[in-house]
Amino acid sequence: MPTSTSKYQYVDCDPDKCIGCQLCEYVCSYTKTGEYNSYRSRIRTVRVDEVLITAIACRTCENAPCVRACPKDALDQDPKTGIIHVDTTKCDACAWCVEACDFGAISMNPATKLAEMCDQCEELEEGPQCVKWCPKEALFITTPDQRAQKSRRELIKEEIIGTKTAG
Amino acid sequence: MKEIKVKITGMDMIQVKVEFSGLSRILAKANDMQLSLSPDQSYVDVIRMVAEKYPTLVGNVIDKSKIALFPSNIFSRNGKTVVMDEQMNDSPQDGEVLILLSLLAGG
Amino acid sequence: MYGYHGKVLHIDLKEKKHWVEQKPEDWYKKYIGGVSMATRLCWENIKPGCDAYSPDNPVCIANGIFAGTPVPVGGKYGLASKSPMTGFIGDSLSGSWFAIALKRAGWDAVVIHDISDNWVNIFIDDDRVEFRDATSLLGKGTYETEEAIRELLHDDQVRSATIGPSGENMVRYANVTNDGRQAGRTGHGAVWGSKKLKAVSVRGTHGIAVADPDTLMKLSFNITKEAQGPHTSKYRILGTSTNVLNMNKLGLLPTRNYSEGVFEGAEMVSGEYLHEHHAVKTIACAQCPIACEQMSMVKSGPYEGAMTGIEYECLFANGPNLGISDLNYVIKLISVADHSGMDAMSMGITISWAMETYERKIFTSEDFKCNSHPDGFPLNFGDGESAVFVAEMIRDREGIGALLSEGTRIASQTIDKERGTETWKWAMQSKGLEPAGYDARGLKTFALGSSVGTRGPCHNRSAAYDVDIQGVVDRFKVDETRGEHAKDSEEYAAVYDTLPLCKFIRRCFTGKADRAGAWPTIGQLINATTGWDLKYEDIDAIGSRAVTIKKAFNIREGWKRSDDSLPWRWMHDPMTKGPSAGYVTTEEELEYMKDLYYKAKGWTKEGLIPKENLIQLGMEDVADQIGV
């Protein structure tokens, strides 16, 4: 199973902090389309049994499976950032990339008939708007190594000192 | 000078208990606090003394100025009357229980 | 038109048809959304004088003006019907995704008429309406039903407002649940049950645009950040249950069917204790950056695993009010109410009436016969296990559960008629609705606010306890200012209930929660959404219009001055313990305060509304029908 082991950055969510407000979805869709619409958001929340909540966006997999799966070669992964770009002249919304993505991070826009995924708001100087807006600072941009470092630091605090970071 | 000092301290001190609940209790990690005030001290001094002992209350329950309570927090005197803004310079009575309440609507 | 679609969806359950009603912009400017618009739709579509369970009582859903935008805490909607508990307007609010889905589907409001021949799940799929057979959903709890519908439709973006078994059984105080939140009071679940309406599901795929997105985004961002600060810490850290100790220390915590205001077990059922021993996670409604819902769980014992969101009102009613000092029982009781879809407040206060009736030896163990207890069982205060059995009997209308499912007014009237007793004296209700978790014997302004409330005694609609508790007035006395205070707080609350906006955000605009602190920002938010140019006085008018349309509805349904009353206990039976002991609101005091309130409102001595009042608020058609 392909996993996000790359050196690339991606937007990640801490499920302990996420409250499921979905403001990230509104802000993302607004940034991309000028309207508030969860269906057009590139980051999607998921809530199970009321308390298991997190948000998922493209995880910039190494050797991205969505790129490999596309029969039209419409997807391209930027070698520097890992961000996936869609060639709008080639994509025909066949949704093989959706199938290939284990994270559910790709959606199809029925109006434009194009695949959509998170591009970390690379055209904005501020960077990812969802990260800027998240009221609980549950969203953050990270690399796998930074993420692992964070987990280790939290573990030390919890196991040895006995304090959990406030939610 | 020495005579006057003896008169002010000791017998004439006012004993006040401040009770914490809700947010103040969680931040102070205490249920209450005993205070000794001299007769010329007021509710403002009570706030100051609480802020000194429990600095975690400042900015949440006690105003940053440390001479007033943060908005929507009140002192209830013995559960009956409220110490209003214009009474903050008054002195508490001996034995008064000041309940520090964070007010909110139910749901 | 920004902020609205200009369309109300009408659905006829009997004929299985639907049609669209266009509404002019002016109508939206007046009624905005929430309780005001829902009541207005009820006014327009009900057959006056009808029974709440009849085909002529409409279900009116009015969306929120900010639903689906990033305006914090704006993801709410209003629900109104004639209440089967009071016979007057039953207006409720609920939060979360249902409102947003409806907005994205392209509807400002939905009116559901008549009664379905078979159990139905309405599915509003953008502009398509489907009448789905709900037989397979029957018997499922509220959350279960939502999940089942998602599975049937293969889409977890489908949002549903549902009733549970309590609503199906027409427990009079059954509620409507969506996304884990409730349109809780006045018996909506029973109305839906009478219509064989199991659920209303919505999927909305359109985007939402606003008139001035730059301004809206800036304002929303600032409020979102402000909402992480000290103005909301009490909500975020402990939630509303922080009120348990607050009220106990003031001697106002309803204990053992409101017999006293201090509970010896208060610490054990406090928000602090709940947080320490039962907290699972704090979550949020859609569109809310505060997150105040304290999901709590029973972690051991016979009810292990019972989990639900705990709010103060449900806690007091099923804890101190039942004399129960063990949160495991309280969580279980609220969980029974939430999963089966009934109002945990009315349920708890009806059970406490039954407990007192038992302790006074009018009920005996035999009265509580049921399948699991063929000889019945005792029902003393403090007996959590028996309380849980009774809650389940109410949900199923089994044995005495059928009587108790009717609420305190009907239950006590029925028993008194049968047995020649006076249980009505400890039935805590006014207009047929049970009150909230603040004992009005120690809150004179709130006593007034409770008596005149259009949906019954409600802290949320009245908010008059604020001036009492904050010491603005002497809470133990009556004076000539109380009418103005009760009017002001009611109209202030009504603005939030109409937009709707959750009241917990009120300090996050400017730091001050009064009108001067809140209206300017609220005005900017409305104007940025719609492109209108509302001023301060227009915001004021939103509130007074909301209260007035509700009052007008009640007058047309036969309200009279004597309906504005208080439970007998609050007028005759003072508390004996704690800081608020020794007080009641006398008949004389109540009538005096009612005079003051009606005068402040500009109404007649009988509480009727002069025509000019209504015309001034732009309600000419209402003036024609009930103005004097």
Image (spheres, rainbow, N blue to C red):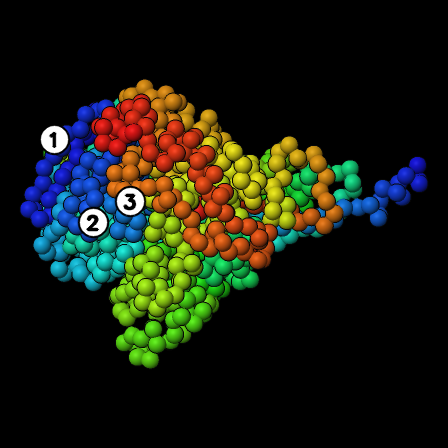
Position of residue B60 in the picture relative to residue C337 (left or right): right
Position of residue C396 in the picture relative to residue C314 (left or right): left
**Label 2: chain letter:** C
Disc 2/disc 1 C-alpha distance (Å): 62 Å
Task: Give the percent coordinates (x, y) of residue B65.
Answer: 63, 33
Secondary structure under tag 1 reads loop
- Of residues C314 and C347, the one nearer the viewer is C347
Q: Which residue is mark 1?
A: A89
Numbered-mark total: 3
Q: Is residue C360 among what the camera can see?
A: yes
At label 2, the amino acid type is Asp
Q: Which residue is mark 3?
A: C88
- Of residues C369 and B2, the one nearer the viewer is C369
Q: Which residue is mark 2?
A: C51
- Of residues A106 and C42, the one nearer the viewer is C42
Up-down relation of residue C437 to residue C472 (above or below): below
At label 3, the amino acid type is Phe
**Label 1: chain letter:** A
- At 71% from the left and 42% from the top, the residue drawn is B92
- At 49% from the left and 41% from the top, the residue drawn is C445
Position of residue C449 in the picture relative to residue A51 (left or right): right
> Which quadrant of the figure has residue C619?
top left
Q: Nearer the viewer, mark 2 or mark 1?
A: 2
- At 19% from the left and 35% from the top, the residue drawn is C44
Quadrant holding the C terminus of chain C: top left
Task: Give the percent coordinates (x, y) of residue C567.
Answer: 42, 52
Residue extending furthest bottom? C375
Disc 3/disc 1 C-alpha distance (Å): 61 Å
At label 1, the amino acid type is Thr
Task: Give the percent coordinates (x, y) of residue C225.
Answer: 43, 34
